[in-house]
Image (cartoon, rainbow, N blue to C red):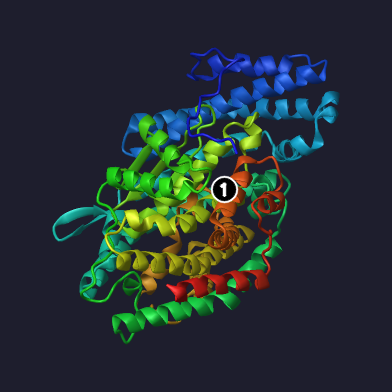
Amino acid sequence: MNYSADIKKLPRHFLPTDFKITNWENLYPYLKNLDERKINSLAELEQWMKDASELEAVISEDACWRQIKMTCDTENKALEESFNYFMMEIQPMVQPYSDKLNKKLIDNPFTKLLDSATYFTYLRNVKKNIELFREENISINAELNVMQQQFGAISGKMSIEVNGQEYTLQQAAKFLEDPDRSVREEVFHKISKRRLEDKETLNRLFTSLLQKRHQVALNTDLENYRDFRFKELGRFDYTKEDCFQFHEAVKLHVLPLVNQIYEAKKKKLGLDTLRPWDIEAEPAGIQPLRPFTTGEELTEKTIACFDELSKGVNGQSFFGNCIRKMKELGHLDLESRKGKAPGGYNCPLAESGAPFIFMNAAGQLDDVTTMVHEGGHAIHSFLAHELSLHGFKEYPTEIAEVASMAMELFSMDKWDVFFDSPEELKRAKEQQLERVITIFPWIATIDKFQHWVYENPNHTEEERAKQWVAIADEFTSPVVDLSGLEEYRGFGWQRQLHLYEVPFYYIEYGIAQLGAIGLWQQYKQDPEAAMKNYITALQLGGTKTLPALFEAAGLKFNLSPNHISTLMNFVKSELEAL
């Protein structure tokens, strides 16, 4: 296997080396060139595709940097204006040309001579984009791109005071691990009440997004935005019915395990009733896990962890070197602070190659999980960067999340770098494996909610709150006592960034968790073989279908209840063996 974290910026052959996108006028000549260029041979077609790919990478990276900078500082108006300018003034001008270039490619007679095995998924995506493109959606999508970012700006301002000190909501979450139950309860209510202060603003924002998204679907001759989004996301290999089957499988095979975990938690804490503010707690006398204190320490410990993990692959520390390279380039923004957008992401940078990791660390175990998760995404970005066309790197989101979620599980045995004792490491592993199980009901809740929302686009805000609670009840463990929290519960969906910024992106986490558990099973039997399968699949980028990518990783693409049950029982057995 030949792979390296010594990533190189793609050389430019079509665009000037010093070219930067400043406005539509300076970008337009290159799109015009591609549109008007004569293609009279297979060689000319392949060169045309390379030039188009180069331009796509430059446009993509420019847009990504504008978004990264804005999410790092939501209060900086200049950064917001830069992002908005691209989305409102440049992107809408690019889209008609993208459609023309897609049609030029598909209609060219030499396209039929391209190797079908190499180009099948690429051309399938191009045809899908042609099918979905409508001129009347350009302005709506521009507005959506800007509006979606308002969620980060609203959430980035949220903070509460604890013991006379101000904390972002991400930072305040550490108090939910406090051994003092009264502290946990107080902070839980403060966080929940702070969210309620913006409930109407967030409700109005979501309603506006919903209406515009529904119009996009209608303009594309589809009944609802769910059907549009399934096509747009390239969900060629599973259907809405498969999602519904997944929801039922979670109820049948996962919820009973969640109930057992929460019963054990209640017993461990010596409580008569388990409340939401008890779920992350440890018994009195046991201090919460604090695996690091600063973003710098998190970075260095992650590098050490990844070095240990990837030495099993040809003796190299490729995984650690990926994070080293990102640190060297300043492509890490890890610590939570006021004015920073919520959440975490890995943003691939199509031209320069080394991605950017953004997160809101506050010194908790969850932050370690987030860092190795985003680190898995980053490794995927590094591995796919050498593929010859930008379109080859547009891999399915389901395999992208396998990359990240498998890394959470692979890396667990090397987490001793974060903890001072074997006992702390054991606690960390227990919490991680419990999370592997308990995340499934939340995934099913968010996904089922989105199906309802977009199938019923004319619902009222009151109906939305009622339906959210009804769906949440289906997937909520009866062991957790939620009495008296009704005011908070109707708006619990508002904390999920994906609903605002990346609609319908959530079932992927469930599908990917199944793949990640499968890879972890392989790892427990033969670490080197599992790592080889992991890297082999990720190096393929988006050049194969989703089932073929799973197969390359030694996995079956299977959403059946029986398969889910088998994997859940494996995780349960590993948890019991700790």
For this orientation, the residue located farthest to the front is 315
Q: Which residue is drawn at 50% across and 45% down?
A: 377
Q: Is residue 251 left or right of residue 286?
A: right
Q: In which quarter of the image is the N terminus?
A: top right
- Secondary structure found at label 1: helix
Q: Name the residue under label 1.
A: 400
Q: Which residue type carries mark 1? A: Ala
Q: In this view, does 425 lie above or below 301?
A: below
Q: Residue at x 50, y 20 (%)?
A: 21
Residue 185 placement (x, y as % from top left):
26, 72
Q: Quadrant of the C terminus?
A: bottom left
Residue 232 position within the rendered picture, expressed as x and y whole percent measured from the top left:
66, 45
Residue 477 visible in image = no
Q: How many numbered marks have been drawn onto this rendered protein structure?
A: 1
Q: Is residue 28 left or right of residue 40?
A: left
Q: Give the residue drawn at x 72%, y 50%.
A: 236
Q: Nearer the viewer, residue 85 or 59?
A: 59
Task: Kindly tell me whether residue 352 is visible in this rendering.
Answer: yes
Of residues 540 and 248, which is closer to you in this image?
540
Residue 578, compared with residue 332, is above or below; it is below
Coordinates of residue 44 in the picture (x, y in percent) = 77, 17
